[in-house]
Image: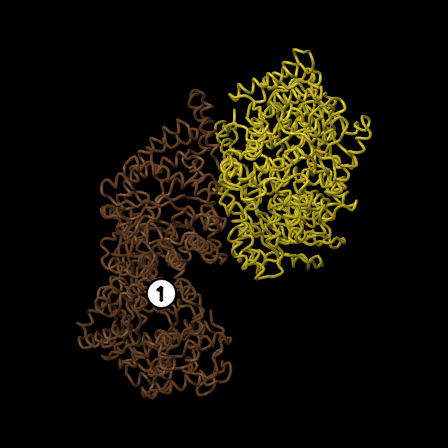
Chain colours: A yellow, B brown
Amino acid sequence: MATATKVPTSPRRKANPHESNGSNGKRWVYRFNEADTVQEMLGGSWDKVRALLGGKGSGLADMTRTGLPVPPGFSVTTEACNAYLAGGNAFPGGMWEQVLESLAWVEEQTGKKLGDRSKPLLVSIRSGAKFSMPGMMDTVLNLGLNDSVAEGMIELTNDPRFVYDSYRRLIQMFGSVVMGIDDEPFEDFLTETKRSRGVKLDVELTAEDWKVVTERFKKIYRTSVDDDFPQDPFTQLALAIEAVFKSWNGRRAVDYRNAAHIPHDLGTAVNVQTMVFGNMGQDSGTGVAFTRNPSTGEKKLFGDYLMNAQGEDVVAGIRNPMPIATLAQENQAIFDQFNSVVQLLEKHYREMQDVEFTIEQGKLWMLQTRDGKRTARAQVRIAVEMVDEGLITKQEAVLRVSPDQVSQLLHPQFEIEAKATAMQEGRQVAKGVNASPGAAVGIAAFDADVAEKWGKAGKSVIMVRPETKPDDVHGMLASKGILTSHGGATSHAAVVARQFGVPCVCGAEALDIDLRARTFRVGNTVVHEGDTISIDGGVGEVFVGEIKRVDPDFARETYLRKLLNWADEFRRLGIYANADYPADARRARDYGAGGVGLCRTEHMFFQEERLPIVQAMILSEPNSDAEARELTKLQKFQHDDFYGIFKAMDGQPVIIRLLDPPLHEFMPDHEHLALRAAGLRLVGDRPNELTRIEELMVAVEGLREFNPMLGLRGTRLGIMRPELSKMQVRALFEAACQLVKEGVKVYPEIMVAVTNHANEVKFMRDLIVGVAAEVMEDMGVTLEYKVGSMIELPRAAITADQLAQYSEFFSFGTNDLTQTTFGISRDDAEGKFLLHYVEHGLLPENPFQVIDEDGVGYLIKLAVDRGRQTRPEIEVGICGEHGGDPKSIHFCHRAGLDYVSCSPFRVPVARLAAAHIALKEKGFKAKED
Amino acid sequence: MATATKVPTSPRRKANPHESNGSNGKRWVYRFNEADTVQEMLGGSWDKVRALLGGKGSGLADMTRTGLPVPPGFSVTTEACNAYLAGGNAFPGGMWEQVLESLAWVEEQTGKKLGDRSKPLLVSIRSGAKFSMPGMMDTVLNLGLNDSVAEGMIELTNDPRFVYDSYRRLIQMFGSVVMGIDDEPFEDFLTETKRSRGVKLDVELTAEDWKVVTERFKKIYRTSVDDDFPQDPFTQLALAIEAVFKSWNGRRAVDYRNAAHIPHDLGTAVNVQTMVFGNMGQDSGTGVAFTRNPSTGEKKLFGDYLMNAQGEDVVAGIRNPMPIATLAQENQAIFDQFNSVVQLLEKHYREMQDVEFTIEQGKLWMLQTRDGKRTARAQVRIAVEMVDEGLITKQEAVLRVSPDQVSQLLHPQFEIEAKATAMQEGRQVAKGVNASPGAAVGIAAFDADVAEKWGKAGKSVIMVRPETKPDDVHGMLASKGILTSHGGATSHAAVVARQFGVPCVCGAEALDIDLRARTFRVGNTVVHEGDTISIDGGVGEVFVGEIKRVDPDFARETYLRKLLNWADEFRRLGIYANADYPADARRARDYGAGGVGLCRTEHMFFQEERLPIVQAMILSEPNSDAEARELTKLQKFQHDDFYGIFKAMDGQPVIIRLLDPPLHEFMPDHEHLALRAAGLRLVGDRPNELTRIEELMVAVEGLREFNPMLGLRGTRLGIMRPELSKMQVRALFEAACQLVKEGVKVYPEIMVAVTNHANEVKFMRDLIVGVAAEVMEDMGVTLEYKVGSMIELPRAAITADQLAQYSEFFSFGTNDLTQTTFGISRDDAEGKFLLHYVEHGLLPENPFQVIDEDGVGYLIKLAVDRGRQTRPEIEVGICGEHGGDPKSIHFCHRAGLDYVSCSPFRVPVARLAAAHIALKEKGFKAKED
């Protein structure tokens, strides 16, 4: 599809026809040598310079200032972009004149002139926003070429092959990027040409071949746009700048910003820069490199380059490039110069740098520097090592690592034995580049739309492509893993996957992907779309079928542990873990939890050998001898449960919630019983069994609830079946007292759930205090303990001042509090309407993942305020799933909570998130802010 | 059981041994002739006089001041009672001396002396609290009698029969009231005596008989208390005063106060008054009377009297008394004097009076006056007629009638045909006194405990007793009706029943009640405990079996309609009704509703001919042709529904709620289908039917929800199935536009339910506005309408400022708001724990009956404030069941709501309650305040 923009007639030295209104003296364009001017104008803030000139433009200006070899050029500002978009796609007044002025300066610097066949200046046009959006925005190289200039250049260089190679690139890129022509006819013809010449690689084509290609490309252009490729370089320039401006609101850019939480109103700058040529023969080349390994974080130069190629050949992963280290063998002097330049850049920016460079006939040119994307593992290691190197402070290191990255680092891995078995079975079918770590299992999807569809439907998907393009991002984000057959560690797939923490294997060349048949083949193995595969992005391995995964080994994450210990110095929030079993409790401790914030006793009831006792207890009359008998049996089990957890948490508090769920959860299903009864009635030979089942049905019917979440549970149950509560409290205190005698430090906190009214808490408190006193006297032990309320109903939050009279702590059960505040049953809602709501913007976020500050958050703040009015020293925390969500943790900090409690696996994430908000409160800034 | 109080030795002229500390000059005792003194001391407030001297004491003092014939006496104050109870059951300092001083004044007035056999003074001791608690408190008559005084009196009166009758009464009353001796042995001996003498009535016994009874009563006393009946009159006096003080905290008094919402810290006064004797022969008598008919309110003297009897003979219903009108025949002069006294009293108090009087040997004495208890019907008529008579203002009249009374007045009645059938079938078994109106059906319970137990278990109970006593109140309150075989319109049963609006038939003498067998018999009919009976308290009829009841006829309630019209002048709140059908809407209008506050469209869907269409619609794919087909069928029905309601409410607003319940409510039950499928599989001859059912099961399973109340309903449904919403809106506007063309005034307000987020409201608002515009254009009609939100989830209340952006009105759905704020499913909770909670004080009230101000009320006030911040003119009301509850209506007024909407039957109640709170806000006081 061609864009609607009319090609203007040559605008050289004239006001641009798209101009919105007269110049008001505003600067829209800055030359690369004006870094100081701009920074001074913006009050010294480099951040503002980045915002105005974009990351790329400011980097080029900064490198120019530092005296590095940067081809001359200038940046059109982000403000100009915004003014263009706001003004109905017209250049703001004066902009075009400033472009021409700056161009004149470039011409002066280089001694060349745009469109002049005797001293031709070619330029690149590149986008560059404040935040890097790799591959998202559009680039045009070799701008300035036309038939006449091409002829002139051939005369000058005597290298028609280079000139036609450059010209055909310009026509394709300009056609594709500026005019919106499909790449396919260009690529098809190129492939066809190589096939007919019997060659495999572009570099094997001759000058004559490229000339033919160039002519054909002009034809393709003409057919698609219904106009000739513009021969006027100024028309090319104006249209290319417009195209970059417009690309800011293109779908792939918007998608990317949504995914990366980048605001939509920043705009992009446009960088116009003198072309240097990596495709001027075998003493020319181009490459990208990182100052440290972006996958592991190791302090060692990392990257790829290709000789006799232009930049996009490396990035797009079309040809497989060489590792940067081999450049030293190729040209030691260039390598040394390059190495010293990038080390300088890293020190200058105090961050790992991602640079682009070109070697033109043996001369090094730096085309870009920016903070390098990296894996979570690399991020952590780099941050920690930079502190050790004295480059940054601990605070900076902590803030540089995002909670999401910690969470990625703790991605699951394949189980060693399961993987070994898969190897023995010959299920490993390929190896590729270990582009983004983590083990993933999912069904193969061969395009982004299918991946997105299946992913949103809740399926685990691995997206498989020859290579990925910016248009594929929506599918990549919906996938659990990404697998490509082409491209290296800096290919689009690798960069995006690392950034979003999706496991990725790139360049697994053994895969023969057939997009039409929707299969890939490796030898005799054929994998169809929908088949399950497994990939390990940490080592680059590809398997057919499923491989069992295991949790990560936190103990071996040395850098992360060091970083989190620093985080602990900065955070104010305590981090507890939810743990129901001793093993959970031990893991929680390993991960750095300061206590158990929620121990749910009901899980203990579901265990196989206990369930019959639990059922018998339920069916007995409350306060009867039969009930007492069953409770005595249960008490033994409960004692052991509590003993184990208290012991594991020696010296730390353990918050134990008394039985919470409605009793029918422990009973068989009524419909199941009814069908069995019907069957027995029909056969008629087991009347006793029938009677038993019929009685059971009556009991189950009696317990049935229309809305169990709002039924007889928590404290209500504790009040209606006080002997059950007493049994739990007795078991708990007996275990605690026993441990005290054994020298263990036990800090039990007993939590009363589903509370609504202060009277309920008082009732349960009296019960607990009574039993505790009894047990302690019996066992001759004195024990400090607390009694508190779980705040999970709006009324409890609203009347927290009253509840606090009988509560030494509050714990917000934000799962249920969200359910009742919203009147939404999570089990029912997520599939039936909640996802639809989030997708269609009816809700900004899933409130079960991120605390809804306006509603649920209001109640939390109210409860904290009111609770502290009554009891200033009351301990307040949360124990819902939100306790492991960074945004929610930030909210908890701001709401003045004392701690958050989350699943043991989320404890490291929570430790970091808590440090971030504490540091931010003190004025430190995270990079993304 | 005997009380623990030790009998003091004669305390005459000495400080009482129970005295707590020395007198501090405080007045504890006032003579009946000190009305002016007390009133002046209390700043002129008669209300404070009542509080200090009690209703009875202040009435006696006031009558004395007015010059009416009141036997001299004095009141020990309520403060003395409180000081006694607070001081560990010891008289406050100085009280006993003041009693003796006042007694001396009485002796002076009467020329008699307590304990003096030559001029014996006998006194009555009566309790009297600020608020009348008839029969609740203790009374001792004839105090001052002992063996010596009795002999002296015989000498003086020459009437040994009268003296021994009086003496035996003292011994029994003193024994029972002061010493806690059971009445039974006394009554048994009296019955035995009458049997052995072959007489039926007390008056038939001779002087000698009474002497024997007196001696035997002394013996019973001695056996029970292990001490002699105290011969010292001062000891009698001190103990009797103490007994009255203590009775304030007796079970029956506490029960009564709880039921009547009387505070427990008021205390009771003790009135000591010269005895006059209605039992001094046939020219003596005693009676009670009302200045107007307490059942109908008719302005005509009403009451009973008995000649030759003491007061308790009338009240206790032991002998059947004579109507007051016959007194004129007996003694015209006394009747005239009596009539003029009571008319004076009514004018003086501007209230219908309930008086006690005694005729002693032809002389009239007034013993008490107080505001008379009455039926709701009488209350309304009296209030209205007193306005017409110029006695009170409209405001006073409105405030005198309580909302509960209006509700009683609208009690159901027997269906005329059902009753006629019952008559033909001979099921009417008795007639009695029509003591408290209303038709009741229930199972017979033969004592208060059984009645209470069954009543609390949710059964409809009619309590059947020979007569009731204050100890029975707890059972009476738990009953739907009361039936006694003895006693008249002023008996204990009648008075209590009228006050609490329980239908009651008294004195149905035909009933032969056997408390041991727990049956009653009438002729050959035997009714066992647990059998169903029906009574009509309005006409005094008793039936066996059930008779169908119908709603009351508001049109015929002339007085009430007049009163409510006055109420409408004073109230600020609008009163709307919840109406789902045209018939409801018409009734709502009849009852004075100003609009329809809630029209639930789902009820329309459940109708038989529509349900299959609804089900087919549900099973179709959203937005499919099949869905459209079924919706078109439904639209026709919906159009007619709306047409009918709008037409009935011509000129008034109608708030229509779009479909609310989850769709599975319209589907068959899964278990039922599973059983049918199992059966079909077994038989195997109807494979098509089996397939159909299996498909249905899959569909039902897909719709199943764990917590339907928190599931896909209301707006969520409207958003997920927008075509369904559009159909409803289209039907609604087509009906409305059609009516406009027919000249009807239609004010539709479309309500969006179960909202949480402003975006939901915006979505629905856009949908509604779009369809409305379409329909109005098609039909060429312009119509004013509103779109609003139902606030029934905490989050909606908290974010009301955001919701108000898209809402022209809010309607609080307090049923659901209470469910979610409390996290309590009403269906599940009431039987399982909520009643237990209320009974055991874990919740002060059932929050589904009375708005929980601390929790739910907080959210309502918050939402009103925030909603008005955004949209000051927003219309705000409630449409939950609380809209018909007076306390909740008062809250709504205070919270600044514009209207309440309730069931049509509650509209009159709501009109009155709304007037009350508006008048109270202006400083008017209701009687009970």
According to the picture, the residue beneath numbered tag 1 turns out to be B920
Q: Under tag 1, what secondary structure? A: helix
Percent of width and height locating residue A430: 71, 22
What amino acid is at disc 1?
Answer: Lys
Asked whether, in this view, residue B49 is left or right of residue B538, the answer is right
Asked whether, in this view, residue A564 is left or right of residue A147, the answer is right
Residue A252 vs B820, above or below: the answer is above
The one nearer the camera, A566 or B126, is: A566
Asked whether, in this view, residue B697 is left or right of residue B124, the answer is right
Residue B12 location, quadrant: bottom left
The one nearer the camera, A443 or A494, is: A494
Residue in the picture at 25% in, 41% down: B740
Residue B622 location, quadrant: top left
The one nearer the camera, A926 or A520, is: A926
Asked whether, in this view, residue A890 is left or right of residue A650, the answer is left
Residue A915 vs B676, above or below: the answer is below
Q: How would you rate the neighbour count of disc 1 (Cα within 10 Å): few for under 14, some for 14-19, many for 20 or more?
A: some
Percent of width and height locating residue A73: 66, 35
Residue A846 location, quadrant: top right
Residue B572 seen by the camera: yes
Percent of width and height locating residue B712: 46, 38
Residue A626 seen by the camera: no
The one nearer the camera, A666 or A743, is: A743
Which chain is indicated by disc 1?
B
Percent of width and height locating residue B923: 35, 68
